[in-house]
Amino acid sequence: MKVRKGIFPVAGLGTRFLPATKAQPKVMLPLVDKPIIHYVVEEAVQSGIEDIIFITGRGQVAIENYFDLSFELEEFLRTKNKRGELAELNGISNLINPCYVRQKQAKGLGHAILVARHLVENEPFTVFLGDDVIDSEVPCMRQMLEVFERYHCSVVALQRVAKNQTSSYGIVQPRQIDERVFQVLDMVEKPSPDEAPSDLAIIGRYILTPEIFRELDETTPGKGGEIQLTDAIRRLLRRQAVYGFIFEGTRHDTGDKLGFLKATVEYALRREEIGKEFREYLRSLQLRDQ
Ligand code: G1P
């Protein structure tokens, strides 16, 4: 069955980025000149996922406005004959077929997915976490869909992490199938390094079979008092196989200040209009510090 839908849980309060996130959603912070969420949506579109379901919270209309037409702005650009900017804005509002569901209470990632149940029903679907921006030749979700097409099971994105970082991720107990593919035998949400079953961490991309909704419905609050997606997938493992896939590409954790800055620098260096000058500026800083 073709996977068409993508759930984007973006209702988080962005507490790691206060005060910048006091009055705007975290995923609207820009990497150079595009909001973080734009990069993640582009990955979805390039992977063939165009029906996007945003799970939003209070005060997140900026996301809706961003993917909508902006009549006044477009009219202004038209009268000023700014064709390039106009085409870019049109491109954004034509990018996806979005739909917005409010998560009325912040009860965790698992709960956020569950509020989209009525829009997904009986199809396999994808999940994109907005903090994880993945830079790769073949879009990460496209790579994962190939694994899904081969095994017809849920697939989670994996990356190796340092032992002292396991408490920031869901960690899997793997059985290797292929160079990059693992059968997941078990998983734990944010274990301490001693309890971690491996160094393979779940990154914010998932393909899930619809049976996950029943499991989410029965999942009780776990780590941090929240309904954890990891716990629901763990329950799903009792009925269905789940695979893990180490994707090819670089993942930027833009939910973290240092990760956000690194991503900003990398994307800026690649920009034609500013890259060269920015590189020279960074070099000059390095020389000054020596
Ligand atoms: C969530 C998941 C975790 C996963 C991580 C990936 O945690 O609960 O299992 O490893 O995303 O980014 P969060 O970072 O939202 O706390």
Image: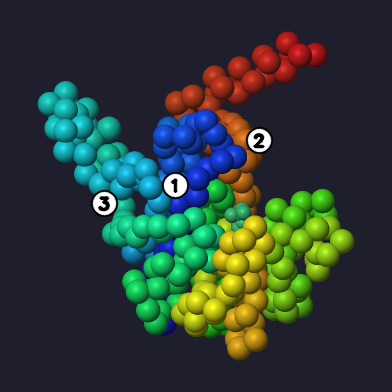
Give the x, y percent position of residue 30. 46, 35
Q: Residue at x 53, y 66 (%)?
A: 110
Mark 1 or 3: the one toward you: 1
Residue designated by label 3? 94
Indicate the amino acid at tag 2: Leu
Give the x, y percent position of residue 255. 58, 43
Crowd around label 3: few <14 · some 14–19 · many ≥20 (10 Å): few
Cα distance between the residues tagged 3 and 2? 32 Å
Cα distance between the residues tagged 2 and 1? 18 Å
36 or 178: nearer the viewer: 36
Indicate the amino acid at tag 3: Asn
Indicate the amino acid at tag 1: Ile
Give the mark, 1 or 3, whose residue is nearer the N terminus. 1
Element assignment for label 3: helix
Element assignment for label 2: helix
Q: Is residue 86 above or below residue 252?
A: above
Q: Is residue 46 above or below residue 90?
A: below
Q: Is residue 63 above or below residue 218?
A: above
Q: Residue at x 67, y 19 (%)?
A: 283
Residue designated by label 1? 37
Q: Residue at x 38, y 47 (%)?
A: 58
Ligand 1, image quadrant it occupies: bottom right
Mark 3 or 2: the one toward you: 2
Residue designated by label 2? 258
